[in-house]
Amino acid sequence: MKPSALVLAGARDSLPMLVGAAPFGLIFGTLAVGAGLSAGAALAMSACVFAGSSQFVAVSLIGAGAALPVIWLTTFVVNLRHALYSATLLPYARGWSARWRWPLAFWLTDETFAVVEHRFRSQGAAGGQWYQLGSSLAMYLNWFLWSAMGVTLGKAVPGLAGWGLDFAMVATFTAIVAPQLKQRPALAAAAVAGAVALLARGLPYKLDLMLAALFGVLAGVVCERVAGRRVPA
Amino acid sequence: MTIWLTIAGMALLTVLIRASFLVFGQRLSFPPWLNRALHYVPAAVLTALVVPMALAPQGALDLSPANPYLVGTLVAGLVALLTRRTLLAIVVSFAVYGALRWLG
């Protein structure tokens, strides 16, 4: 496949994620304005940080007048899961130069990770950097535009943040995960991760998420061992 | 002024986390068991993000059919599982969720 075709394929395969992220960007914009951020600061956050859930937490902390180190520490912990994504993609990125690795790392979101990981695992990672670039650029532009829309609407429709648009994230992630659960080890990983996340919810600094990820992955590995066969790669 | 420092710090931390293995781990080679373990990262992490929001959207466990997050999540999972069409699952579940919220 030509690079341009791969970029397009990456963007096209990310379409559901774009739809799912849109309401999320919208709420971020409205919340940021509500927390007292200027339009410029809200958009700068979307452009430079580009990590939805940590941006949400940050604006609520800013609104509550939290100290700078608290905001940074929270950002670090909330985004720590991306290190797992970074590690998961590493085996596919062997041939990539540093010129590729840095920007693709910067753009590595939950959604792009889910899309490219699925592609690399099922179809191989040949030309994968172009494919990931397509997904990344689509997600990045989408996030910025919907944040901007939220900033604009936030001033006009103050109650927008209470509309429950956050369900979009739940719907997106559920739709990604559900088809994977036909494989028993993935089902075990999901079940245990979900149970741990539920039981440990509210732990400080979102540690519940890392704990759940750890136990979930462990459950997947154990189940695979017990079943005595490898999952088709 | 502080807001720009806040954003700069957040941006730096986030990109360093994302670059951790992809950029700095270039020479790292994972043992086979770890490579296999990483296959379960998407299912584990995404589910861990979803479950508390679906089952306890207000913080307390809410398993009632009047919980739109729960019903919506079930619909999203079911449609995705049956049709494998992510976009359809998102749109249909959002519609169901919206209807439940609006009615409730």
Image (tube, rainbow, N blue to C red):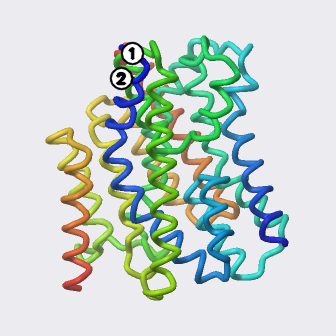
Residue A227: quadrant of the picture: top left
Chain of the residue that carries numbered disc 2 in the rendered image: A
Above or below for A102 versus A225: below
Please tell me whether mark 2 sits on a helix, a strand or a loop.
Answer: helix
Amino acid beneath label 2: Ala
Q: Residues within 10 Å of mark 1 (few under 14, many from 20)?
A: few
Above or below for B29 versus A184: above
| Residue situated in front as seen by the camera: A208 or A73 | A73
Please tell me whether mark 1 sits on a helix, a strand or a loop.
Answer: loop
Identified at 65% across, 61% down, the residue is: A45
Which dot marks residue A2? 1
| Residue situated in front as seen by the camera: A124 or A191 | A124
Amino acid beneath label 1: Lys
Q: Position of residue A9 (x, y in %)?
A: 34, 29
In the picture of the structure, the residue carrying the numbered disc 2 is A5
Identified at 67% across, 46% down, the residue is: A80
Identified at 75% across, 40% down, the residue is: B16
Q: Position of residue A128 (x, y in %)?
A: 47, 20
Decide: marks 1, 2 in contact (CB < 8 A)?
yes
Q: Position of residue A129 (x, y in %)?
A: 52, 23
C-alpha separation, residue under disc 1 versus residue under disc 2: 5 Å
Chain of the residue that carries numbered disc 1 in the rendered image: A
| Residue situated in front as seen by the camera: B6 or A197 | B6
**Does residue A100 appear left or right of residue A229 in this picture?**
right
Q: Position of residue B48 (x, y in %)?
A: 48, 51
**Does residue A81 appear left or right of residue A225 in this picture?**
right
Residue A134: quadrant of the picture: top left
Identified at 19% across, 68% down, the residue is: B96
